[in-house]
Image (tube, helix red, strand yellow):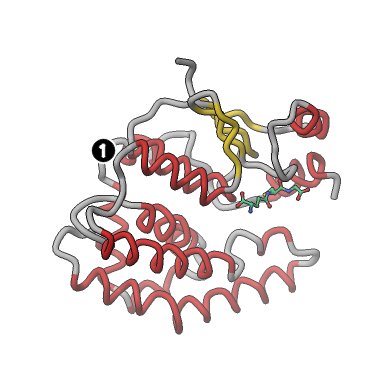
């Protein structure tokens, strides 16, 4: 069987949760980075992008799209799921919260038209995070015996939450927020030393939060 191929930009964005899950499942894959408009249009011509959007994961003879659907597929394949219906429901709820937390703007801020708008978006995301999302995850982790969000092993909820939390941890002006959430600091360390993830997170394949170069390439590829 050929190696899975994950096509996206050379940045975290919508692909990062799948990269985290593939690495945790220790599934070898190739990252294919889009750099030109032509490469993107070719994928559409080839019928690989159902809704003309990336990321695309080519795996098991399928063209999978939709970041959450792709993540679910990889979690199922890697047995990174809940062990009961109750656990699966918790996973879904926490994943939704983690997704909304990220939607607040940590990854989108860099794509704003002016530095003022970028700063405004970052600050608003930080406030939402502090008031609504981080206290919930802090409490859940305080009650967890395994150090994971649900049950005794990694699940989709962990990949989605860690993705959002990484921005908080890596954007210097937002990072002090974590001082009020000791369990989250422990969680970052615990998650980061899991097999497969430890190697990935310290490798050059793990991208930084978006910078000017990523914004430039995305604008070219998507013709913004
Ligand atoms: N719901 C999709 C959204 C993906 C998405 O918006 N991808 C952007 C790149 S980050 C894209 O391909 N945009 C092209 C377009 O909408 O024309 C997912 O979760 O994967």
Label 1 packing within 10 angstroms: few (<14), some (14-19), many (20+)? few
As drawn, which residue projects farthest toward the top?
1
User: Residue placed at 49% from the left, 60% from the top?
Assistant: 167
Residue 48 in the figure: left or right of residue 127: right
Residue 176 placement: quadrant: bottom left
Residue 132 percent location from the top left of the image: 45, 81
List x then y, in percent, for residue 19: 46, 40
Front residue (pair 86, 106): 86
Q: Would residue 61 appear left or right of 152 to someone viewing this image?
A: right
Q: Ligand 1 near label 1 (Cβ, under 8 Å)?
A: no
Q: Name the residue rendered at 85%, 45% in the picture.
A: 223
Looking at the image, the residue that sits furthest to the right is 223
Compared with residue 224, is residue 3 higher up or lower down, i.e. above or below?
A: above
Residue tagged 1: 195
- At x 74%, y 72%, the residue is 117
User: What SS does tag 1 mark?
Assistant: loop
Q: Nearer the viewer, residue 168 or 172?
A: 168
In screen coordinates, is 213 left or right of 104? right
Q: Nearer the viewer, residue 34 or 113?
A: 34
Q: Picture quarter containing residue 188?
A: bottom left
Q: Is residue 89 above or below residue 195?
A: below
**Residue 22, percent from left and from top:** 41, 36
Residue 125 point in image, percent of width and height:
57, 74
Q: Relative to 17, is 6 above or below?
A: above
Q: Quadrant of the N terminus?
A: top left
Residue 149 vs residue 175, the one in the foreground: 149
Q: Give the residue drawn at x 34%, y 65%.
A: 89
């Amino acid at each position: 069987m050929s190696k899975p191929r994950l096509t996206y930009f050379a940045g975290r964005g919508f692909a990062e949760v799948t990269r985290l899950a593939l690495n945790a499942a220790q599934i070898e894959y190739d990252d294919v980075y889009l750099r030109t408009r032509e490469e993107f249009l070719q994928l559409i011509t080839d019928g690989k992008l159902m809704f003309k959007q990336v990321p695309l994961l080519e795996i098991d003879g399928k063209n999978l799209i939709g970041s959450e659907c792709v993540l679910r597929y990889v979690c199922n394949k890697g047995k990174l799921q809940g062990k009961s219906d109750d656990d699966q429901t918790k996973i879904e709820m926490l994943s939704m919260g983690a997704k909304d937390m990220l939607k607040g703007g940590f990854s989108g801020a860099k794509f704003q038209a002016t530095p003022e708008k970028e700063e405004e978006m970052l600050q608003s995301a930080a406030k939402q995070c502090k008031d609504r999302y981080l206290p919930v995850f802090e409490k859940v982790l305080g009650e967890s015996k395994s150090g994971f969000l649900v049950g005794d092993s990694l699940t989709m909820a962990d990949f989605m939450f860690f993705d959002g939390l990484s921005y908080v941890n890596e954007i210097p002006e937002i990072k002090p927020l974590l001082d009020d959430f000791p369990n989250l600091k422990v969680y970052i360390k615990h998650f980061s030393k899991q097999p497969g993830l430890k190697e990935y997170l310290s490798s050059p394949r793990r991208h930084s939060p978006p910078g000017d170069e990523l914004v430039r390439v995305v604008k070219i590829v998507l013709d913004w």
